[in-house]
Image (cartoon, grey):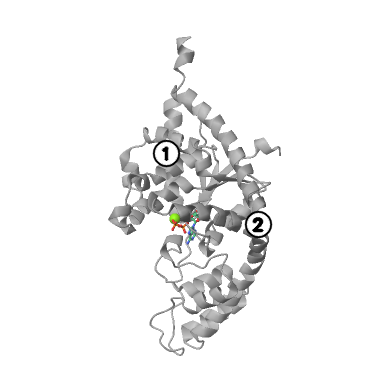
Amino acid sequence: MAADSKKRILTGVRPTGALHLGHYVGALHNWLELQDQYDCYFLIADYQALGDHFHEIDLIRDSVLQVTLDWLAVGLDPEKSAFVVQSYVPEHAELTMLLSFITPLGMLERNPTLKAEIGELPVERRTVGFFNYPMSQVADILLPRAHLVPVGDDQAPHIEMTREIARRFNRMFGEVFPEPETLIGRVPRLSGTDGQGKMSKSKGNVILLSDDEATVNKKVRGMFTDPNRVRADIPGRVEGNPVFEYHDAFNPDTAQVDDFKERYRKGTVGDVEVKVALAKALNDHLEPIRERRARYEQQMDLVEEAIMAGVRKGREIAEETMTMVRDAMRISTYTKSWN
Ligand code: ATP
Ligand code: MG
């Protein structure tokens, strides 16, 4: 299939820290499989990160490189896919603004992910920009006129909103945008090591793809498990227990996992044994990723090249789409009609 006849993917992360296991099972493993079939745009959403990290620009700058290293480390290929830094393609901001004029306020007010996230933010960090971030995500997806958006399930409301805005725009101004489909990862929402909801960079409950073996061992040892099980001979709960959730997600030895679950429920296996096996499975999974990351860390010029090549490709499609959008909306086209 010729490159330009492939369908397009847009997805991304906020550069608010290095990537973790939740990103892997919720997003990256899908991206890896899709990069041959689709024309992929992987976005490092640094404008969006400003929403609640406007006071931490250095963290955002550093995280742009950390995220790129993590992507290269898991095997995303900048020759196949475009790694785009959002602020290098300011059309993202222009499209966000234009689409905000056709977006009813209630769409944002009702968005369940946004509501929950704002509720968790201290008042001094609740900015208009943060409230508007799903809107900017709509623009991110529509700018390359994406057909498919592979994400974790916390993002599903934003993609539903994108579909509505695409329909609304097309109805009002003529057909410009495809209605993108959502593709949820093999684990829609991996829990954090603290068992208190989603693993998330902002919550400090993460195992990073770049954590070394000793750090993984330590984090797994300290993981939240069934709190009622103060001794190994007390029957324990497997459901909702993040230790077993991670075993299911990362341990390829399913017979071992089934055996642990059975014995855990009966109270015939200790937490330590289950956790040691988990740490081993995680380290086996992470080792090749760490090795590739270490190689790229020695070749930062390749990392920068990957970003700049992606930005060039991102700019091309952004310019193309914005010409279509301005023409359709009859914005910045006055001189033509005056002639
Ligand atoms: P932050 O805390 O700064 O919001 P995050 O850890 O939530 O960071 P994002 O950059 O917001 O990461 O998310 C990037 C992508 O990874 C999204 O598609 C999101 O759905 C997915 N993702 C993030 N965390 C998880 C998780 N714990 N389980 C499954 N998918 C996840
Ligand atoms: Mg997030």
Return the x and y of residue 198 as percentages of the image width and height.
Answer: 43, 63
- Choose between 48 and 102: the one closer to the eye: 48
Return the x and y of residue 174 as percentages of the image width and height.
Answer: 47, 26
- Choose between 187 and 216: the one closer to the eye: 216
Q: Quadrant of residue 134?
A: top left
Amino acid type, callout 1: Glu
Q: Residue at x 54, y 40 (%)?
A: 146
Return the x and y of residue 109 as percentages of the image width and height.
Answer: 31, 46
Answer left or right for 299 relative to 258. Answer: right
Contact (CB < 8 A) between labels 1 and 2?
Answer: no
- Choose between 108 and 167: the one closer to the eye: 108
Residue 156 seen in render: yes
Q: Residue at x 43, y 66 (%)?
A: 204
Q: Give the numbered dot on residue 164.
A: 1
Instruction: Report the number of numbered marks.
Output: 2
Secondary structure under tag 2 reads loop
Q: Quadrant of residue 66?
A: bottom right
Disc 1 to disc 2, how far (Cα)? 33 Å
Q: Between disc 1 and disc 2, whose residue precedes?
A: 2
Q: Residues within 10 Å of mark 1 (few under 14, many from 20)?
A: some
Amino acid type, callout 2: Gly
Q: Quadrant of the N terminus?
A: top right
Q: Residue at x 64, y 64 (%)?
A: 289
In the image, residue 216 sits, relative to residue 115, either above or below, namely: below
Answer left or right for 51 relative to 301. Answer: left
Return the x and y of residue 257 as percentages of the image width and height.
Answer: 57, 77
Residue at numbered disc 2:
75
In the image, residue 299 sits, relative to residue 318, either above or below, namely: below
